Amino acid sequence: MLMADLRDLDMRLLVAFDAVANEGTFGRAAERLGYTQSAVSQQIASLERIVGDRVFDRPGGPRPVELTPLGAHLLEHGRALLTQLDRISDDLDRFRAGDAGRLSVGTFQSISNTVLPSLIGSMRKELPGLEIVAFESDYDDVLHDRLAAGDLDLSFVVGDVDPSFDTRHLLNDPFRLIARPGQFPAGPVQISAIVDEPLLGQHANSCQMINEAGLRSGGLDPNYVFRTNDNGTVAAMVRAGMGVAVLPLLCVDPEDPRVSLHPLEPAFPGREISIAWRSGHTLSPAAERFIELAVSVSAEVALRFAELDPPPPRRRTKRPATA
Amino acid sequence: MLMADLRDLDMRLLVAFDAVANEGTFGRAAERLGYTQSAVSQQIASLERIVGDRVFDRPGGPRPVELTPLGAHLLEHGRALLTQLDRISDDLDRFRAGDAGRLSVGTFQSISNTVLPSLIGSMRKELPGLEIVAFESDYDDVLHDRLAAGDLDLSFVVGDVDPSFDTRHLLNDPFRLIARPGQFPAGPVQISAIVDEPLLGQHANSCQMINEAGLRSGGLDPNYVFRTNDNGTVAAMVRAGMGVAVLPLLCVDPEDPRVSLHPLEPAFPGREISIAWRSGHTLSPAAERFIELAVSVSAEVALRFAELDPPPPRRRTKRPATA
DNA sequence: CCATGAGCATAAGCATAACTGATCATCATG
DNA sequence: CATGATGATCAGTTATGCTTATGCTCATGG
């Protein structure tokens, strides 16, 4: 018996098999499927060649065919396969809508604290079937490597990345001086005014590099007395009087009354935050949507920044003129 | 996008898809599958036409292809399908060995008590993967109907059945007089000796018909004072002195010292027990095996009958001659 | 007992799908 | 810039799948 592998099976043969089993005759099955009786006869013959045994007893004459025991057994498997195919079809449709599969996103602390919660909230509300996995690291190269390896679909990044990645710009995150309240008068502080202050900062990473370069360009040779990547710790140390810090605005809580924030003068560029993915690689619909939402959430954050600094000129709500 | 249904999918496309995903290039996948690179390229193109999207990013040049997000998602499904196909293949092999699937057998009380336990025991030991379902009825027509409807794969039957069934003969079950010990001298009893005895018997069924016909042919016009299909009850009634019974040997316990069994004279034919199935219908391998085992277990039973009656002439084991 | 019709199988013919072999374009590499 | 590995594509061939036409089987009903 020349018995082929089931892996050579065309699902259409199972469809025909199922139809014949339901209809009882090859002819009616053919009619339902839009074939001729002969075609169905040949399809069943193909199926039987593949499984190696008859799946129908043909009693001859006008009597309907009946499943052989093996046919009945196979049909259970076959129907399970067909419904699984339908489920896969549905799942692919959901995937195309972004509402299935998994999305891995690289992030770093300040993003995780600010844009990510609302972003993931929106995604989960809009695409509840999508599994979102976030991976956080404050070391750019870790994120880059995992992104390049395909472990991550998307990653938030700081500054420019090499051209093997495509990016979408999200926002500019300006640096601010963090000091004790009252230590400096409200408003901008000259960099020259803090040349002798002990500095608190982060460990070396691209953000800190931008930061230090900016300070140096303002004539300050930074003297770091403590470095930590935990932004909360930095703020606490400032409150404790250990020194002052210069941090990206996203890294501090602008609502915290226990520290005061000051723009620096002369101003130097903030860090540019983008979202990146491997160039030349198709993005999943979920990733596309994530990027769009990231852009809009970031725009809201940028808007809050703009309102924060210069400190909003306490504009009184316009009174309706009394007639 | 002319997107076909997944039900039109040929599993060979998934095999190629899987191979390319594993090998990284169309060419190596083709080599492994015994195709040309061109064939695999076209197979992937077919797959992509069916799912409606690219499943690989082709970076161009000598770089390997990489799964698109949708491709990765589809591949998980595809691999699940392929392993399911392999499992089905294995299951079909087991089915062909009789060790998978379900076997429904029709039976009646005396068979259930005697041949069936050891028969099912042998089957379960030999084919532990087979599910055996027994359906018992003491009404022949019920068994016949269920067999004809295909609810039963096989059924034990009494006597001849209509030609829409095929049968295999199992054994002849002779009728015996059941009496109180001492009521008659050991050995055969003339039918004429029990013409005045009140009779116990079963309700009308084919076995009882044969029985009554036999008694009539021996000159006895049976006078039934109690009928039940429960053979244990018949024996108990005999012990209680209600009357005597004529039952097939399979229906009584020949080890029970509280009743005594007697052949009747003139002898009349016992009931013929066979196993039947729908003629023209393929039998499952499990059913084939069941029939074979039924034949051999029945032969053992017939042997015990032969030893029982005439009571085995206590033949001494031959002593080796001393030199 | 024969005519009828429902049913599947099969052969012949054709259209299409699938595969091969050759060639082209792409692009990393040295 | 030459090279080589890669996928796409085209033309040609083979294989597959489908239709039409026909034959065989067998239950049914005169």
Image: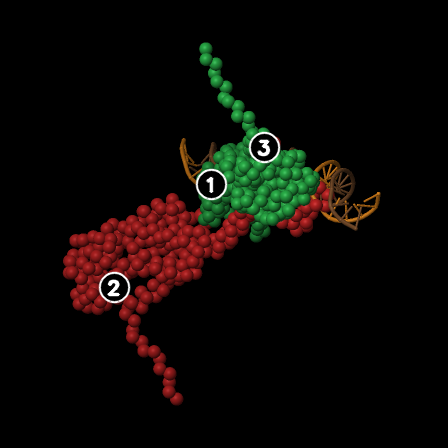
Chain colours: A green, B red, C brown, D orange
At label 3, the amino acid type is: Gly
Mark 3, residues whose alpha carbon is within 10 Å: few (<14), some, or many (≥20)?
A: few
Residue A320: x and y, percent?
Answer: 47, 16
| Residue sitting at x 55%, y 44% | A241
Crowd around label 2: few <14 · some 14–19 · many ≥20 (10 Å): many
Q: Report helix, strand or loop for mark 1.
A: helix
Neighbour tally class for label 1: few under 14, some 14-19, many 20 plus, Cα within 10 Å: many
The image position of residue A245, as x and y in percent, is 59, 42
| Left or right for B167, reference B63 | left
Tell me the element at label 3: loop
Q: Amino acid at mark 2?
A: Pro
Please determine if labels 2 and 3 lie on a single subunit: no
Residue A151 horizontal/vertical position (percent): 60, 46
The residue shown at (66%, 34%) is A266
The amino acid type, in three-letter code, at marker 1 is Ala
Residue at point 50%, 22% (across, down): A316
**In which quarter of the view is residue A98 placed?**
top right
Q: Which residue is mark 1?
A: A21
- Quadrant in the picture for the N terminus of chain B: top right
Whole-angstrom CA distance, mark 2 to mark 3, is 123 Å
- The residue singled out by tag 2 in the image is B263
Q: CA distance from mark 1 to mark 3?
A: 83 Å
Describe the element under mark 2 as helix, strand or loop.
loop
Mark 1 or mark 3, whichever is nearer to me? 3
